[in-house]
Structure formats: C-alpha cells, structure tokens
Image (tube, grey):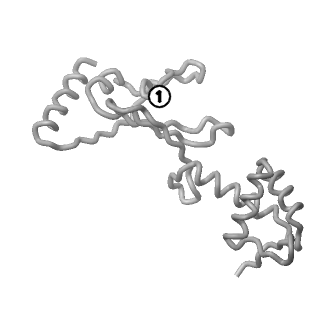
Amino acid sequence: QERQALAMLGFSRVCTDYQINLSCVAHFGKQKGDMKDQYTRPQARIAGSGACSGFTDPQVYMLDPLGPKQPWHTLGWNPRHAPAEEFRFVRNAQGLFVPYELFDAMDRREKLLAALPADPTSASVLLKLITDTLQVSRTQAYKHLEDLLRDGWLVRTGRGHYTKAKPN
C-alpha cells in the first residue's frame, strides 16, 4: 500500500504542475464471496482503497444489482471535498445504462397502457383501474389520467367517458 500511495502522490504532483487531469480506471476488488461478510462502504471493496482514497480525488464505483428487491446497478462517487452520491441505473434493451427512475416510469406507463380497456370507460372506473394497477392514491391516479389524456393515449368520448386511442 505504501508503494501505491507514493505513486498516487507522484501523479497528483504531476497533475498540479502541468494543470492536467488524470483519469485512471481499475477493475480489481477485494470483496469476499459471502454476501454477509461484505465491506460496509462500497469504495472499501476496491483493492488498495486506503491509498486510493487518501491520495486521489473522487473514487467512482459500480455495484451489481442485488436481486429482485434491488434490480438496479448503483453508480457511486466519493469526492474528497463534497458529499458522496449514488445513482441508480438499469440496462435497456440495447444493453445501455439508463437512469432507473426513467426506466421505472416507462415500465409503469407500459403496465398502465396494457391495462386500459379498449371500450369507452367511465372516469371512475379508469381511476380505480389506475389506482389498482400502479398502487397509487386516487389523487395520483387522477394525475396519471390527465397525463394519458394530454399525451394522446386516451380520448374523451363523452362527458366523463374515455376510450383508449387508436394507434396510428
């Protein structure tokens, strides 16, 4: 660890002298196989993390999903002079990372669209359907109903009645 610390300190001085940034990527871990015997801090799971955190600037790490209760990857960064932050991502159909919140919102919209009946339906029935499908309050269901109307997924067929829009 001492040799790593000296190397990091040397890199830091070169960067300061030449006013440059040096971004290094390393893929090496010291994680133990048993999930119950993990290091608490994700950045501590990086081999040589003591020297890295002591003699470098931000550390960035990515954690794999932890099963169905946590289906997202966690990207975290631990800067020296600011609070640490974490961001959640999932892979889309092309294998690219997209923010989990965006993916979750798209997934919810797909579930909702699949649940909408094709026949004209009253607003009260639609609100109950939205509440049950998305597990949201009636107020939130009303907002989803407004969003579906605004975005053209639902069409008003009469007072208090709506139908699923026909695909173009």
Q: Is residue 2 above or below residue 144?
A: above
> Can you say whether 54 is above or below 99 in the image?
above
Number of marks present in the image shown? 1
Residue at left offset 59%, top offset 59%? 93
Q: Position of residue 115 (x, y in %)?
A: 82, 61
**Label 1 belongs to which residue?**
42
Residue 118 horizontal/vertical position (percent): 85, 72
Q: Position of residue 161 (x, y in %)?
A: 86, 71
Q: Is 64 above or below relative to 132?
A: above
Q: Residue at x 23, y 41 (%)?
A: 22
Left of 111 or right of it: where is 126?
A: right
In which quadrant of the rendered image does the N terminus lie?
Answer: top left
Where, quadrant-wise, is the C terminus in this rendering? bottom right
> Is 19 displayed left or right of 129 in the figure?
left
Residue at the far front: name it: 159
**In the displayed structure, does residue 86 sit left or right of residue 1?**
right
**Which residue appears farthest toward the bottom when viewing the image?**
168
Residues 152 and 10: in front is 152
Quarter location, residue 64: top right
Residue at x-position 58% and y-position 38%: 65
Q: Position of residue 106 (x, y in %)?
A: 64, 58
Which amino acid type corresponds to the residue marked 1 in the rendered image? Answer: Pro
Going by the image, does 110 lie left or right of 18? right
* Residue beneath the point at 34% across and 23% down: 48
Label 1, secondary structure: give it: helix
